Amino acid sequence: MRFLASTLDRTIECGCGLSHHVATRQIFVGAGALARLPRLLADLGLSGRGLIIGDENTLAAAGTRLGTLLATAGRSSERLCLTPGAGSSRIRCDLRTLRKTQTCLKGNFQWAIAVGSGSIGDLVRISATRVGIPYIAVVTAPSNAGILSPEAEMLDRDNIPQQVAGLTPAAGVIADIELFRAAPPELIRAGVGDAISCAVSPLEWQLNRLLCAEPYCERAGRLVRTEFKNFLEAAAVPQDSPEFLGALTRILLTSGCATQLVGRNNPATGGEHAFGRAAETIAHQRGREPLPHGLNVAAGSWVLAESYRRLFRPRRRHTTGTYNPGRLEQLASGWKNFHLDAGQTLQEKADRLRNAEAGLEQLFAPAFRRAVSHLEEQYQTLRKLYRRFELPHRPEDLGLSPEDSAFLLEHASALTGRLSLLDLIPGMIRPA
Ligand SMILES: [Zn+2]
Ligand SMILES: [Zn+2]
């Protein structure tokens, strides 16, 4: 039931030249894992009063059992039930809810429990870091890969999603698969969508390693690849079985663990996440509630997977072009219409594109081809997962108009300063 035990709570002097440290100390995944909570609190050395933070649904799913477990163990705790803002059906990590969570935590509690993942995890991660107390994540649905992340996404005052980095991740995690049976299928669908980003994010990382000398860690890369393979193998079993839910939870946790290992989200996010954030931003600006993170990311993963496959089809020949600074200006001015200033990320991207220009041919060398060939092997299973979970493939599937869909395809990569295959195809790589 302990998961990732050989990687947690230790400093690893790694072959990549970095000294890795994962801040999360214990993870339990499995049926009945919730019962481990009192022991986990003791192992983590947490004393004093705790605040259990969730929403109506997650507290209904796990709150009563948590309360009983804590009371039986003689632990003092209170509950904070968060409510969605006006005009929204979901809890958002916005300024209003952050202020509320922080005010409640400050000075009153020595530890917290985030009940739920997604926005609740983001809210508690930011608030607990700011207040300076540890927290435990109790997962009520495997809905996204942010559970172990040292980063979070919050909405700024203009409702634009912003990444917050350098946060203290959960000290411990409990993912009780029995709780997942009551989870809305929609959340599991989003989790599958987010997990699928691991089909393309390792390629995007290797692309940046190859063309921009971005630091790369084989240990973190292998961790994600291996667990993703396990997840795809479990794709054949029924989706409500403990095997499938366990495998889904493990890949979502692993991508966060890899992020902690290297201190950046490079192993787990690439252009597909920029695509997801772009779709979310467009929806906000059009006054619509965006789809869950995992679904936006699923569409981005499909677009990227198809781009990689097209590029590396056998006998396909390509010419390489040059970096065109004018295109980046077009991207920046396009996003201005959505009140988003992409200037800083595009500055970083411009540097990377200039560096990439000289080495572009390396993309077609055997080493990178081999990395892409894994995607080819996984393709049929991925297709089945998209069909079974009705995951979005294209921008139009995200409810965007034809104009916004075209804009998204063209401009999504501007939301990351790193290189993505999405940057290279429009100008620097062309079919011969
Ligand atoms: Zn994600
Ligand atoms: Zn390493």
Image (tube, rainbow, N blue to C red):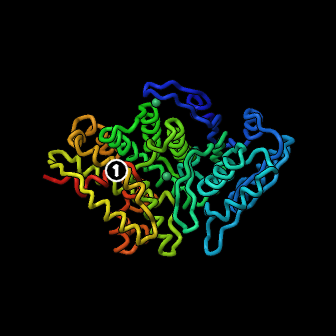
Going by the numbered disc 1, the residue's amino acid type is Ser
Residue 237, image x, y percentages: 48, 47
Q: Residue at x 15, y 49 (%)?
A: 319
Q: Is residue 113 above or below residue 103?
A: above
Q: Is residue 273 left or right of residue 432?
A: right
| Residue at x-position 23% and y-position 39% | 362
According to the picture, the residue beneath numbered tag 1 turns out to be 420
Decide if residue 181 is in sight here.
Answer: no
Label 1 neighbour load within 10 Å: few <14, some 14-19, many 20+: many
The residue most toward the left is 432
Query: With respect to residue 292, does 380 lie above or below?
Result: above
Is residue 421 visible to the viewer in this orientation of the structure?
yes
Where is residue 152? Give x, y as percent.
57, 52
Q: Position of residue 203 (x, y in %)?
A: 35, 43
66 to the left or right of 378: right
Q: So how many labels did they put on this image?
A: 1
Label 1: element kind: loop
